[in-house]
Amino acid sequence: MHGAPVLGWLLAALTGAAGLYCLARLCAPASARGGARGAAARESDAAAALMGLGMAVLALPPAHQGGLPPVAWAAVFAGAGAWFTAAALRRGGPGSRAHRLHHAVDAGAMVYMVLLMAGPAGHPGHGAMAGMTGMTNAPAPAVLALDPVPLVSGLLLLYFGGYALWTGTRLLRPAHAVAGPGGRALLWMPGMSRACRLVMGLGMFSMLLAG
């Protein structure tokens, strides 16, 4: 962070790999899943894939971000957050609702970050990560000019820092091996999914800290 482009590339590589892993799980045929995957787990894979790949793109240097305008990023993540919030309120047990609300917080934090990054160039707190400054170099629509809110940023940092610590402790627990050929066993290994969640939490924490 703080002016080191290599750190932006590293964050993009880690979150992108986690997002691609979750995308591979999401796209795996039912026969490969062995019937162990329910609708809630597929929702989690879809959310993690979206967040991981989204964080990876936003962490890239401006020339490699694909030119998608900030308002489009905000709309994508806002839509995902609204969907998960509605799903959490509609159905599911306490565990499923907690997972969906976490994904809604993820999406809301991404919207918050996009709006901060799309604010006026030179705004305090902007451009801390060299790979995330592309949106601050061009004039942004007035609707996207958002002053940093230290309280919101602090609450999100506490949430994702705590989530990363909690996920990291779960990685220390023994995980049961998954039967199947090498690639399939790796795809459904519980420790891998926990590692991806840890990467997501640390990635969001890093983006908020640098933003």
Image (cartoon, rainbow, N blue to C red):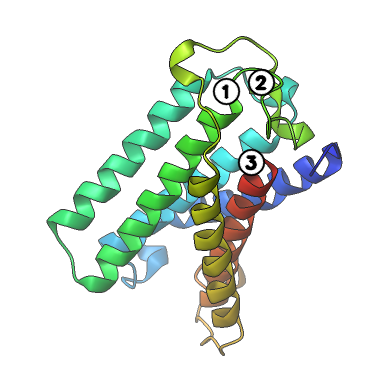
Q: Which residue position holds label 3?
A: 56
Crowding at label 3, few (<14), some or many (≥20) Cα neighbours within 10 Å? many
Mark 3–mark 2 Cα distance, whole angstroms, equals 17 Å
Question: In percent of the image, x 68 and y 18: which residue is there?
Answer: 121
Counting from the top left corner in percent of width and height, residue 29 is at 38, 56
Tell me if 64 is positioned left or right of 42 in this view: right
Residue tagged 1: 118
Label 3 and label 1: CA atoms lie apart by 17 Å
Q: Residue drawn 54% across and 61% down?
A: 158
Residue closest to the eye, 187 or 67? 67
- What kind of residue is marked 3? Ala
Q: Secondary structure at mark 2?
A: helix
Q: Are marks 1 and 2 in contact (CB under 8 Å)?
A: yes
Q: Is residue 95 visible?
A: yes
Q: Give the label on residue 108, or none.
A: none
Give me the residue at 67% from left, 51% from top: 206
Q: Which callout, 3 or 1, points at the residue further toward the start of the chain? A: 3
Q: Which sits in the foreground, 16 or 93?
A: 93
Picture coordinates of residue 151, whole percent (x, y): 50, 48
Task: Please tell me whether residue 200 is drawn above or below residue 50 in the rendered image.
Answer: below
Rendered residue at 76%/41% (across/down): 8
Which quadrant is home to the C terminus? top right
| Residue 70, percent from left and from top | 52, 22
